Image (cartoon, rainbow, N blue to C red):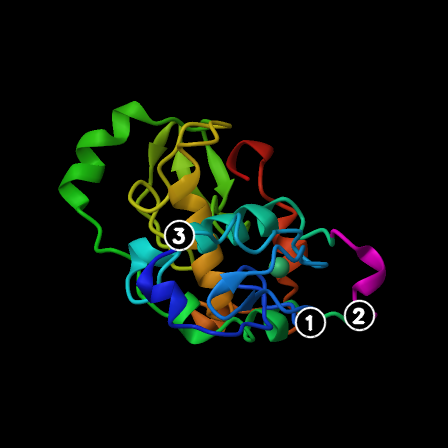
Amino acid sequence: MTASSAEVDEEDFCRMCGWDGDRFWENGQPTAALCDSCGSESGTGDFGASPGSWDGVAQLHRFRGWWLGAGAEWSHPRSRPAEWDLFAQLANIPPPWREPVPAPVDRERRIAERERYGSLGTETVCRLCGLSGETYWHRGAPTGLRCPCCGAESGIDDLAVPGDWYSLAGIRALRGYWAARGGPWYLPEKRPVDWDVLRQFGNLPAEWR
Ligand SMILES: [Zn+2]
Ligand SMILES: [Zn+2]
């Protein structure tokens, strides 16, 4: 138990997904409640998280990013509202758990480390948000494109080894952070009127989920 997590006494919203169906933390202690929506258990997936910095909350974003990329399935499907609004639910996540901005990117280092990561050859789907139709990677090399939807830059923000759980942490954390902010479009004029983020996540290749 860290001092900073004990400052938050009672929490009725899941830190990962914003579901309000339970008491997750009480008197600074986890209740071990299982979230009906994302399936995380308070005191397990969110243990050790602490407000105030990206590093303190990145694990929450990482779990959320994994859950969303995997289809955002409900662990207790009968609790799912008929007209479920994902972004409305995520907006319930208390600000201390979703507002610290990502740690600054060391571009030179990312570029130097690219060789250690991988690609699927030519990729026309954003590894973070699943938007399709742009060329993010061409024959194994990043195009440097900024995704019109999530704003991630290929070759900088999306480095990972395909299908490797640990190396996917950075992609998942940024996906979860972006979604918790309401999924803002980098180029808002490109946002379809009937945009469906969950359908878009469905485009993600299995290797990047
Ligand atoms: Zn949850
Ligand atoms: Zn994207």
Q: Is residue 11 left or right of residue 119?
A: right
What span is in magenta?
A: 75-82
Quarter of the rendered image showing ligand 1: bottom right
Amino acid type, residue under disc 1 in the picture: Asp
**Furthest residue toward left:** 108
Amino acid type, residue under disc 3 in the picture: Gly
Q: Measure the alpha-carbon separation of dots 2 and 1.
A: 8 Å
The reply to whether dot 3 and dot 2 touch (C-beta < 8 Å) is no
Q: Is residue 140 left or right of residue 103?
A: right
Q: Measure the alpha-carbon separation of dots 3 and 2.
A: 30 Å
Q: Where is residue 119 shown, x and y percent of the image?
A: 42, 28
> Mark 3 highlights which residue?
48
> Mark 2 highlights which residue?
81
Q: Is residue 48 left or right of residue 65?
A: left
- Secondary structure under the numbered disc 1 in the rendered image: loop
- The image shows residue 127, relative to residue 61, as above or below, that is above
The quarter of the picture where the N terminus appears is bottom left
- Residue count near mark 3 (Cα–Cα under 10 Å), binned few <14, some 14–19, many ≥20: some
- Secondary structure under the numbered disc 3 in the rendered image: loop
Residue sitting at 63 percent across and 69 percent down?
23
Amino acid type, residue under disc 2 in the picture: Pro
Q: Measure the alpha-carbon separation of dots 1 and 3.
A: 29 Å
Quadrant in the rendering for residue 103: bottom left
